[in-house]
Amino acid sequence: MTRYVYDFIEGDRSRADLLGGKGANLAEMTRLGLPVPPGFTIGTDACRAYLATGSPPDGLFAEVDTHLRRVERQVGRRLGDPHDPLLLAVRSGGRYSMPGMMETILDIGLTDATVAGLAARTGDARFAWDAYRRLIQMFGRTVHGVPAEEFDHELAALRATAGPDGPDAGQLRDLVSTYQKIFLRAVGHEFPQSPQEQLRQAVQSVFASWNSARARIYRRQEHIPDDLGTAVNVMAMVFGNLGPDSGTGVAFTRDPATGLPGVYGDYLPDAQGEDVVAGIRNTVALPELARLDPASFQQLTGVLATLERHYRDLCDVEFTIERGTLWMLQTRVGKRTAAAAFVIAAQLVDEGLITLDEALCRVSGAQLGQLMFPAFDLAGAPPPLTVGVGASPGAAVGRVVFDSAAATAADGPVILVRRETNPDDLPGMIAAAGVLTARGGKTSHAAVVARGMGRTCVCGADALVVDPDRGEFTVGDRVVRAGEVISIDGTTGRVYPGAVPVQPSPVARYLAGELDPQADPLVAAVHRLLGHADAVRRLGVRANADTAADARRARALGAAGIGLCRTEHMFLGGRRELVERLILAEGPDAVAGALAALLPLQRADFTELLAAMDGLPVTIRLIDPPLHEFLPPLAELTARVARAEASGRDPGRDGRLLTAVRRMHEANPMLGLRGVRLGLVVPGLFAMQVRAVAEAAAQRVRDGGDPRPEIMVPLVGDVRELAVVRAEAERVLAEVPDAPAVPIGTMIEVPRAALTAGQIATQAHFFSFGTNDLTQLTWAFSRDDVEGSFFGAYLQRGIFEVSPFESLDTVGVGQLVRLAVAQGRATRPELTVGVCGEHGGDPDSVAFFADAGLDYVSCSPYRVPVARLAAGRAAV
Ligand code: ADP
Ligand code: MG
Ligand code: MG
């Protein structure tokens, strides 16, 4: 027969799947001999059965009765005994902590018949009637959805008329009968007078609370699966509201905000746990308990020490003191800030409780990422103007500008405000301290680019009406003009008027080499754990960088080279015209002339880049995007030409551009003429780029440097594409005197390339997975479109827990990665394999790449420390 129920003494913390976190830890504390009120746990499988069928599984309550008998024996009281009733707490608790999201019902077992027994036993009739009214309210709300206000209203009225000591026993008895009438009116039957019936209904409503709206929202937010179900803990009640020598509180074994040791927590004398949450009275700081009840305080600190040693981690607890006796109601490994996570992990190593390897697993790349961003000092913040999507963290303050020209021309920090951004806004985004858009979500252009650059970004602030022509934006009736200062918080998405004070991140300053590693406990902890990550990791970490400044920054942050230099970024800004010239060129001479004009510019870019990364590999990707991205948009050109014609002018160059744009128009440009295909059909384009690389490297050699360029061909799907490009590149390389050997490799970003990686490796010195395109093409998702349209629905319906552009889809896309690594290495055992693109800086994806046997990941400079840490974690 299936078994559903386990006494606390039967469980332990390893069984959280079945017993839930709360139940498993109550069991663990019971085993440790700590003072836990007797009880038992109904396993999550019973909840799953209930949720599947709508009724409790057969035999469940018979089993509950058996375990209840044991609790009754241990406590020495019986449920429903009119002279000395046992009261029960019925508490939810799933595998993962979901604080306050599901239901708990206290004081089960009180009825018209037992309330007098409780009064007699405790000698406190007022307390007993108060407990009864609490039960009716909690039960009414939780089991039958009676709004709490209906009861609160009566309680408030009574409190208002009662004397300074609050309502007396008689008044509370009357309140209970009022509550029973409210219950009857709202529910349609009397408040149940059978304690067993109360228990059964309470258990079922706890099951059902797994699917409450707030629980679902919380799970989606925290990426907790929807099908786990909750366990139910049934345990003897203890009372913190039996007078001044009673009380309830929460405590931490160290400070969860900073990680520093000490006694932290809150205590509320003469109260039940729910009063703390309700904020009815103010709590006192835990050290105050030392004065109020020294014996219990001492016992509590002893328990905290035991728990921390046993769990070898920060724990938090809920406790209640009933007339001088301490009871533990809950413990768990406590949530903490990112800063505390690092500090505690390092301290526990010092205290000999955990190893450095373990410490590394106690912190995450995501936490390190958070610590690198400056933060607003919210004490000085006005109410926000509006709230958008926090798309790229950080705290940015600056004057409002509406376009790239104004952003690059401004002195002093600016916030670029756009309805949405496109590649034309790149110079402005580079120049700005932060980016604010009215449209688009977390993977919109603005968000992706801003994250890549470490720029603070708030996007999708849809209350914003942006009017660049008038030089202003409005939020409701509030107008903000160009030049006014605003502050944006890329973590919370809040947009503030004026300058909110910013605190720089000490961790970022340390990582950039500006702060001594021993500057403070947090920096010291980061230094130590990141150092350990570097010592143990097998995965290399490179950076995606297109400029020498980015390359230097990346190197300072620990990058071992550049994994992706996007050469098209060198064609933007003022050089756009040269690209236009290339596109408009008619005949071989004109083409050669246009290319010759681009060559020295590219060469200069590469020379600087190779100098900044001297001695380290620099992977240069040949031009990738469709060429028309460098031309003005069709609508704009059409309008310009029409205006010229209407006023009788010759549209000239615009006319020719318009023809070119029309000719090059593609319905699906991302599936069109781009990447290697461009190199194959635009004669001399790739050759010019290869020559620029070779000449830059040769110059570096002559200057005594150690340049290590690598050439990477994008969008290859067939080995023959690569073979043609490679032959041409090698011809060019051979023509340049003093050029070092330059490995030639390819991106693996088209599914066909992954499927035929064995063939492609015959022509490639290295592979680099372009997981953005690979994801886009494997899923058939247009990355530029899907985010704003249906991704929200997919996330909401649980089809994704996270966007596959944010964290690699290891189940699907990951299989292509594994396949290509295996086939590529089978052909060429010394093949170097890396990954470039957003996933290279995502900690979960980094763990996958380590497991898939890649040699390195490449990510934006700001993510390099995050990737180093994640790679270290993956290795222990
Ligand atoms: P949550 O998971 O939302 O914290 P809990 O199951 O911990 O919910 O219950 C909420 C509160 O109920 C606890 O903080 C505690 O104060 C009170 N409580 C729980 N169990 C008992 C008990 N056995 N005796 C007295 N109070 C209890
Ligand atoms: Mg709790
Ligand atoms: Mg690509």
Image (spheres, rainbow, N blue to C red):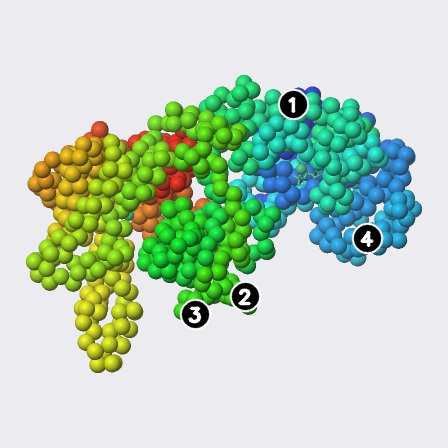
Determine the residue positioned at 53% across, 29% down.
Answer: 521
Determine the residue positioned at 25% across, 50% down.
Answer: 570
Give x and y (percent) for residue 129: 86, 43
Disc 2: which residue: 478
Disc 1: which residue: 305
Instruction: Answer with mark 2 or mark 3, whichever residue precedes in sequence.
Output: 3
Give x and y (percent) for residue 777: 31, 49
Disc 3: which residue: 470
Give x and y (percent) for residue 48: 58, 41
**Residue 343, placed above or below residue 403:** above
Q: Quadrant of the N terminus?
A: top right
Give the distance between the C-alpha atoms of the residues marked 4 and 2, in whole angstroms: 40 Å
Q: Amino acid at mark 3?
A: Arg
Residue most extreme to the top: 352
Bin the neighbour count of mark 1 within 10 Å (Cα to Cα): few under 14, some 14-19, many 20 and up. some
Q: Secondary structure at mark 1?
A: helix
Q: Which mark is residue 156?
A: 4
User: Front-most of 231 and 499?
Assistant: 499
Q: Does residue 776 appear left or right of residue 271 in this picture?
A: left
Q: Amino acid at mark 4?
A: Ala
Q: Amino acid at mark 2?
A: Arg
Determine the residue positioned at 62% across, 29% down.
Answer: 254
Give the distance between the C-alpha atoms of the residues marked 2 and 3, in whole angstroms: 15 Å
Give the distance between the C-alpha atoms of the residues marked 3 and 1, in whole angstroms: 64 Å
**Residue 753, placed above or below residue 514:** below
Instruction: Answer with mark 3 or mark 1, whichever residue precedes in sequence.
Output: 1
Q: Amino acid at mark 1?
A: Ala
Q: Quadrant of residue 200?
A: top right
Q: Is residue 43 visible?
A: no
Tag in front: 4 or 1: 1
Instruction: Answer with mark 3 or mark 4, whichever residue precedes in sequence.
Output: 4
